[in-house]
Amino acid sequence: MVRPVSSIRNLGPATEAAFARAGVHSAEELIALGPDEGYRRLLLAGERPHFIGYYVMVMGLQGRPWNDCKGAEKAALRARFDALKAESWDDRSAGLEAALDAIGVGRRR
């Protein structure tokens, strides 16, 4: 049985839609990819990086509530997030996308 991404704890319809735009269409696909590769695909698909979204997904993939992430574990996740962002997100394109959105010709989400 194929489950939607939103069946993973902490992940809802907006996250499911973002993963679909990134080519991940089921909970099973995301679980197989793992949190870092899954999040990297979101960034490469143009989603803006957001640390809370990253660690909420990590906690969900572990079956844990989003607010269970604290202390040293949260610091380690922040380091992983920063590395993913550095390798997969181009801040220059974010500025261009914002300018295009402002005049009504940006990418539709």
Image (cartoon, grey):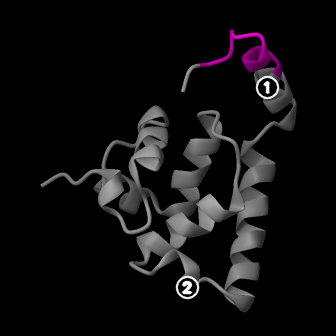
Label 1 sits on residue: 98
Residue 38 on image: x %, y %: 51, 53
Callouts 2 and 1 close, C-beta under 8 Å: no
Above/below status of 29 relative to 44: below
Q: Indicate the secondary structure of the residue bearing disc 2.
A: helix
In this orientation, which residue lies closer to the viewer: 47 or 90?
Answer: 47
Q: Which residue is drawn at 71% across and 49% down?
A: 49
Query: With 75 as the anchor, is 54 left or right in this view?
Result: left
Q: Which residue lies furthest to the left in this view?
A: 1
The amino acid sitting under disc 2 is Asp
**The magenta segment:** 99-107
**16 inside magenta stretch:** no
Residue 52 against residue 50 in the figure, above or below: below
Note whether 86 is above or below 45 in the view shown.
below
- Neighbor class of circle 2 (other Cα within 10 Å; few <14, some 14-19, many 20+) is few
Gap in Å between the C-alphas at discs 2 and 1?
A: 33 Å
Name the residue at 63% across, 39% down: 47
Q: Say which quadrant the C terminus sits in.
A: top right
Q: Quadrant of residue 53?
A: bottom right
Q: Which mark is residue 1?
A: none
- Residue 89: image location, x then y, percent: 75, 42
State the image quarter where residue 11 is shown.
Answer: bottom left
In percent of width and height, residue 63 lies at 39, 78
x 18%, y 51%: residue: 2
Q: Is mark 1 on a helix, strand or loop?
A: helix
Quarter of the image with the N terminus is bottom left
Dot 1, how many residues are within 10 Å of its Cα: few (below 14), some (14-19), or many (20+)?
A: some
Dot 2 corresponds to which residue? 68
Residue 51: percent from left, percent from top: 70, 61
Amino acid under disc 1: Ala
- Say left or right for 72 vs 55: right
| First in residue order: circle 2 vs circle 1 | 2
